[in-house]
Image (cartoon, rainbow, N blue to C red):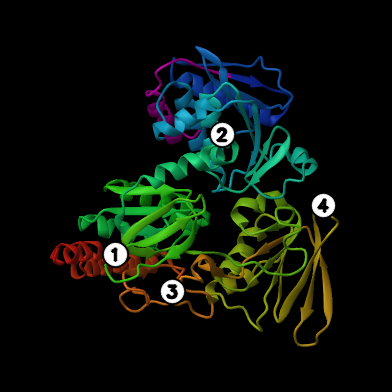
Amino acid sequence: MLEANLKQQLKQYLENLREPIELVASLGEGKKSDDTRELLNEIAELNDKVSASFEGNDARKPSFIIRRASDPQKWVRFAGLPLGHEFTSLVLALLWAGGHPPKVEQDVLDQIERLEGDFDFEMYFSLSCHNCPDVVQALTLMALYNPHINATLIEGGTYQDEVEERGVMAVPATFLNGEMFASGKMNVEEILAKVDSGAGAKAAEKIAGKTPFEVLIVGGGPAGASAAVYTARKGFSTGIAAERFGGQVLDTMGIENFISVPYTEGPKLSAALEQHVGEYDIDVMNLQTAERLIPASQPGGMHEVVLANGASLKARSLILTTGARWRNLGVPGEMDYRNKGVAYCPHCDGPLFKGKHVAVIGGGNSGVEAAIDLANIVGHVTLIEFDSKLRADQVLVDKLRSMKNVDILTSAATTEILGDGERVSGLEYKNRETNELHKVELQGVFIQIGLVPNTEWLKESGLELSKHGEIVTDARAATNLPGVFAAGDATNVPYKQIIISMGQGATAGLSAFDYLIRTEPADEIAQAEKVAQPA
């Protein structure tokens, strides 16, 4: 089952077990149950603290639970084999059940243990989904630390009938107590924020007590991480307020143009960024959404960022790195069938459309790459491009045209996504040359039409924005507001690339440093003037 090198790695990991753990399987007939038995036996043979039994009676077969022998009320269940992207999740589940401490802040563990009520989570994942492991690992951690939390993690390919019955058309898909809870990537803090009614108030209270920063970075993607490292290395007190650390990189699969690294994946790069930031005294405040910017009244004064939870952060210098998000198509049916056939991540959701007919909307690099990936999974792909020709790199276009189960439509404007009330059944498009309307019967639509900057919260701040909503910056990453800088995909700098965002983040960090050393703090000036006034 496990390759020799993978088995050796697992053996080394299991040396960290502090207590015995039990693997209890519920098996039926067939290859997948046989594979589950083989996997669990292999794991048990690697360490004498692991035992495997096959006497479970769960309705889902094959499935197995992982639990600590001394505390069997805390367990997590995998239905289907957690291999592929989920092998790390399996390893962590084994270690955490065996008493190895997770790399999570103690206050997060305390919050999990304090949760009251009964929480029965069911979560569907695919083995090719790079967004799923975060949810799998978060629910695993919660289940192993609170006996009132159950987590069943289900590999959708093994339970295709169940996926169809529950209308799961995008992963990760999480149900709580039988009802849809969330669709999409979440970490443990995000899940806790949804289930713990007092989490927001606690976070706001904690933030309210922070002293002003010399540099505050809003956004935690590559640009924000780069800026933070540069300002922290200069000795300035630095904070990062991020809606989710890692930003859109977390949703990126293969990265092949990050110079000096021939290939990596978004989640791996994001983890590396977080580790690098963690090497410095940088205050990272995750899950914080900025709602309003109140600029300083004079150079050297304090800028204020008001957060969605009501708290505020202040700093002498700001670096805005809020990034961008996938652009919506904006046609009837898109929002109605989101996660019901309308998807934005082919790597995550492609396996759910195996053998089906899907469309990809967008003829740039992202769209053509998505169509190529999907053509190897689904039955048929129709690529729809508004322009008269595809805009992707020629090597990608040539590859796409070589695939026999792909149709390419250019000069085609999608006008509506059609469905039966439950899921997508087709789409309508207009031929822009003849104005004729056409319908295509299909079961999925993947939208890949570019990005929208996350700058709506800045429109009333006095900050200059382009007609596209991008933050206008100069060669030093400075905005029109003194002491406010910006970097990354939220700005008007062309070519939205990770490596460019990092470079621009470094520029913004150095520019903030230059601003701070050349600008006297306004509060100190005011205090000096007050002292100088005659009595």
CA gap between label 3 and label 4 equals: 43 Å
Direction from residue 59 to residue 466 in the image, left or right: left
| Mark 2 crowd level (few <14, some 14–19, many ≥20, 10 Å Cα) | many
Query: Callout 4, which amino acid?
Result: Glu
CA gap between label 3 and label 2 equals: 41 Å
Q: Nearer the viewer, mark 3 or mark 4?
A: 3
Relative height, residue 238 to residue 64 (above, below): below
Question: In this figure, which residue is indicated by the disc labeled 3?
Answer: 463
- Tell me if I can see residue 319 in this picture: yes
Task: Name the N-terminal-most of marks 1 and 3.
Answer: 3
- Tell me if I can see residue 259 in this picture: no
Q: Nearer the viewer, mark 1 or mark 3?
A: 3
Residue 481 drawn at (x, y percent): 36, 74
Relative height, residue 496 to residue 33 (above, below): below
Task: Name the N-terminal-most of marks 3 and 4.
Answer: 4
Question: In this figure, which residue is indicated by the disc labeled 2?
Answer: 139
CA gap between label 1 and label 3 equals: 19 Å
- Look at 62% across and 24% down and name the residue there: 64
Which residues lie in the magenta part? Answer: 1-23
**Which residue, as the protein is rendered here, is positioned at the far top?**
70
Please give the label number shown on residue 422: 4
**Which residue, as the protein is rendered here, is positioned at the far front?**
535
Question: In this figure, which residue is indicated by the disc labeled 1?
Answer: 509
Query: Callout 3, which amino acid?
Result: Leu
Q: Which structural element holds mark 3?
A: loop
Task: Name the N-terminal-most of marks 3 and 2.
Answer: 2
